[in-house]
Image (cartoon, rainbow, N blue to C red):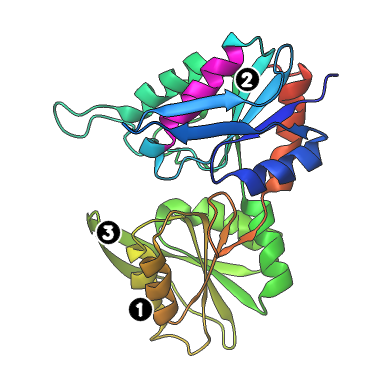
Amino acid sequence: MITPLFVALPGNEAMAARLAASCGGEILALEMREFPDGESYLRFTGEVTGRDIVLVCTLAHPNEKVVPMLFAAAAARDLGAYKVGLVAPYLCYMRQDRRFHPGEAITSRSFATLISSNCDWLVTIDPHLHRYRSLDEIYSIPSRALHAGPAIAGWIKTNVEHPFLVGPDLESEQWVGAVARACGAEFAVLRKERLADRQVRISPDHLDLPKGATPVLLDDIVSSGETLIEALRLLSSSTRVKPVAIAVHGLFAAEIADRLRSAGARLVTSNSVPNPAGLIDITALMTPAIRILTSGEDAA
């Protein structure tokens, strides 16, 4: 098997280095800069002909990242790469999975068509599969939607004493329950009603915190932070133990992290999106899938 080449799009250098080391690959640098009018210039600094190219590009804040990533994929193919895969630990454009109002774009399908037309396979972590059963419904290339639950459970077991897991809504019950079982903890879920993009109302559903337990709030994405902040407000009336707020994907700006800390919580996320709270490493979760997809043994 020819050694795969891992190519980091800007901001993904640390993740690409970890994945290359764990997958037995090599790093290939991508020269990137902008022309004065804002157009992107890209150049691979080594030979890609006949090689498996693994683009590493988490897709938080995607509008500034997608075009260079697609150009890199197209250039690799044009230069004779054997296959071009995309590792996107956070996969964007999944929330609009239906037409909620007349005239809306179903961007999840449109984006899936773009990626499927330019890449040969996709690996991601916990995409927002709300109304889709799997990525195969919209992606026409081999895709692997992996779960951060085992890594989160391992971190909780090592770092939290007497954890009691709390999910933000009824939809999270199955996922939160699986993480709780993996780390030997009890759990409960809250009820969430979204009033607007940045406004939620949360109420308890059979929430009875054991004495001395550390509340561990779990969510898939922290963006505006309103869900966690509202949940923390509710928990503050039930316990004086400092809670831990854990999310798979941290899309928040710095002020959101400050607000969560001010609300009395320790914030922790995976490193799917680079941020100071990204203490839970998901490299090992993605390594087996990447090895299979770059070896040519995949059966889509």
Residue type for callout 2: Val
Q: Within 10 angstroms of label 2, few (less than 14), some, or many (20 or more) residues?
A: many
3 or 2: tag closer to the N-terminus: 2
Tag nearer the camera, 3 or 1: 1
Mark yes or no: residue 138 visible.
no
Which residue bears the numbered disc 3? 193
Residue 255 pos. (x, y %): 36, 69
Q: Quadrant of the N terminus?
A: top right
Q: 234 and 123: which one is in front?
A: 123
Q: Which residue is mark 2?
A: 84
C-alpha distance separating marks 2 and 1: 46 Å
The quarter of the displayed image where residue 259 is located: bottom left
Viewer-side label of 3, 2: 2
Q: Position of residue 65 (x, y in %)?
A: 44, 36
Using a 10 Å C-alpha cutoff, classify the residue at mark 1 as few (fewer than 14 neighbours), some (14 to 19) or many (20 or more): few
Residue projecting furthest to the left: 102
Provide the residue designation for mark 1: 233
The residue tagged with tag 3: helix, strand or loop?
strand
139 to the left or right of 254: right
Type of residue at label 1?
Arg
Which of 261/108 is in front? 261
Spatial separation of the CA atoms under disc 3 and disc 1: 15 Å
The magenta segment is 65-77
Q: Nearer the viewer, residue 287 or 12?
A: 12
Q: Residue at x 42, y 62 (%)?
A: 168
**Does the magenta portion include 134?**
no
Q: Most extreme residue toward the front, as rendered?
A: 36
